[in-house]
Image (cartoon, rainbow, N blue to C red):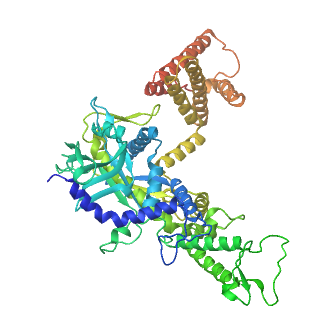
Amino acid sequence: MPLEILEIEEKAQEFKSLWTRQDTDRDHYWLKPYEMKMIDDETKAVPRIVNLTLNDPATFAYRAIGMLQLASPQIVVEGENLADDFTSYIEHCLTDFYMTIDRNLSPLQLSLFPVVAEQSSIRGSVAAQNLTRKGKDGKLIVDVRPLDTRYQVYDMGMTGLNWHAYITRKTRSYINERFKYDIGEGKQSEIVYDCYSRKRHYGWVGSGTGAIQVEDSIHPYANENNGEGYVPVVVQKVPAGSMLADEDNIAHDGESIFALNRNLYPEMNRLATVLHNITIASFFGALQYASEAGEKKRVTSPPYGLGVVVAVEKGGGFSLIPVSDIRNATRLLYSMISTRIQKGSFPETAFGTLTFPLSFIALTKLIEATDQTITPRLQCFALFYRALSEMFIQQVQMFNTSFELGVKGHKKTYEPSKLAGEYTIGYRYYSESKEQRVANITEAQASRGLFSDDYIRREIMHHPNPDEEMNKLRDEQAEKADPAVGLYRRVHSLIDAAHNSTGEVQKRYDMEARLTMRTLVMMLKQSAATQSLQFGETDKRTEGKQQSKQIMPLLEGGGGGGGGRPETEEEVEASIQEEERIARLAETGREGRQVEAMVETSRNRPKAR
């Protein structure tokens, strides 16, 4: 059954209470100027006062969003009997996928993760439209657009979205580019309904019965998901707030960071305004004038100003209206509300007000005070990125050719067939503030001997790629145990650098590779000679002479022949051939034939006489 705009507008009525809440949160976030209203008529402002707007909600929001943007992801690909190279292949593909998204969003001055952090904090939910597809030239088009959930309407079925509509006001040029429709010379913008069902893409310009349908076509994902199709949109609520089944629950599900303080911020502004006006009134306070005429006495010139002398009749004159009790009560109420706002957001210490070091326990308690706000949003990140990643893997399965991901200078080619298999993609996000990092390091040090290094890396340090970090540590240990390993890797890194360079830079890398290869060969010769001495593999007839030639270079740092010149023509010829062989070996490595280079090194390794 085709989707109609009236069905969308009817569904939008259910979202109105949610939109009202989100608009209120937006006003707090943007510090909408406070205006005190009359008690008996909230449509009228209180006259002759100075209103004050505190920055508490914005300070809290900016701090929370900043902490969320410091969060580090840990991709987890799990399944039965999965090889490490297979899971690493998927992880690298997804990393390049999100790198490509940010590259494509950069002309719009957007980046996916900061938008996700703000949306989860202020709106309480996250959404993105994923239109990754094959272009006319057969190349992959990564088209992921973050959405503002304040302007979305959707219908959720038993197995996911039945349809999704994004309702925003767009400019004339955007509508013309997106839908090939011109709204006319007299209009600068118009409401646009951009909608996807499981099989079709719809578009309307305008609203209600006057809306004009400008799009109705089958989208590329109509035959996926066992032929049922799917909506190319990911929607994820923050797992915070109420999950009750009441009729108006939509306004309380997927809560923002302002959930606990939403009604306290206006009262805080009201009290701040009262105190502010009392302070101003200390210069021009309210006065009373006592006289025999009483309230019928008209006073036209209040005696304000320094050095003013006022003549009064006996028993009369001006006096201050008593307001001390009002001031004390106001301050007490202000303190009560301020304390509760801290309990509903971050404590004062979370804003960097401490000037002294804290213990591990104190740091842990400080971090736990922010968990009620940060943790639900980190869980939202994990669920959102998992769904978006699974949708991307499903979309590239439509390709029968390789595709490129990444940015200039870091592009990689991936094969869809290598992404197929039975596995699950998971994400874990951890807040990595300095306090959190210090606490994690302290806990990791205390856990040595109680837990494995792998557990410490994953569960305590929350490293984004613990397997890769483990391999790096093993590489460093191998290089420390045998310097030849480090030289070997250095040779091939120089070879790769030479391949990616031109001109003088390439020559420099090539020369460094040759020199490093020479040093490596000499080191291997010395090592072989030393091993020969250890195991007694020497010729008894020349044992003393041979030892003098092999031990001295180890002390002087020379080559296999010591520091002296060759004694015979055969040795001179052998030395020349050795130099030529080293040059050929470096050239062989430079051309990328790494295995041949290793074989030649092993074949020509010197033997004891």
Report x, y in % for residue 65.
52, 57
Q: Is residue 474 above or below residue 280?
A: above
The residue closer to the viewer here, 22 or 487, is 22
The residue closer to the viewer here, 474 or 140, is 140
- What residue appears at the point 42 percent right and 57 percent down from the top-left corner? 381
Q: In this view, does 288 lie above or below 249?
A: below
Residue 493 can be seen in this image: yes
Report x, y in % for residue 14.
29, 65
- What residue appears at the point 65 percent right and 23 percent down from the top-left corner? 559
Give the number of callouts. 0
Q: Locate residue 558 relative to residue 399 in the image: left or right.
A: right
The residue closer to the viewer here, 15 or 316, is 316
Q: Is residue 314 above or below residue 490?
A: below
The residue closer to the viewer here, 459 or 454, is 459
Q: Locate residue 219 relative to residue 174 in the image: left or right.
A: left
Q: Locate residue 538 relative to residue 464 in the image: left or right.
A: right
Q: In which quarter of the image is residue 408?
A: top left
Q: Quadrant of residue 351?
A: bottom right
Quadrant where the C terminus is found in the figure: top right
Q: Is residue 178 above or below residue 576?
A: below
Q: Locate residue 249 relative to residue 534 in the image: left or right.
A: left
The residue sitting at the top extreme is 569
- What residue appears at the point 61 percent right and 65 percent down from the top-left corner? 350
- What residue appears at the point 23 percent right and 50 percent down from the top-left corner? 210
Report x, y in % for residue 485.
55, 36
The residue sitting at the left extreme is 1
Quadrant where the N terminus is found in the figure: bottom left
Residue 423 can be seen in this image: no
Report x, y in % for residue 284.
73, 72
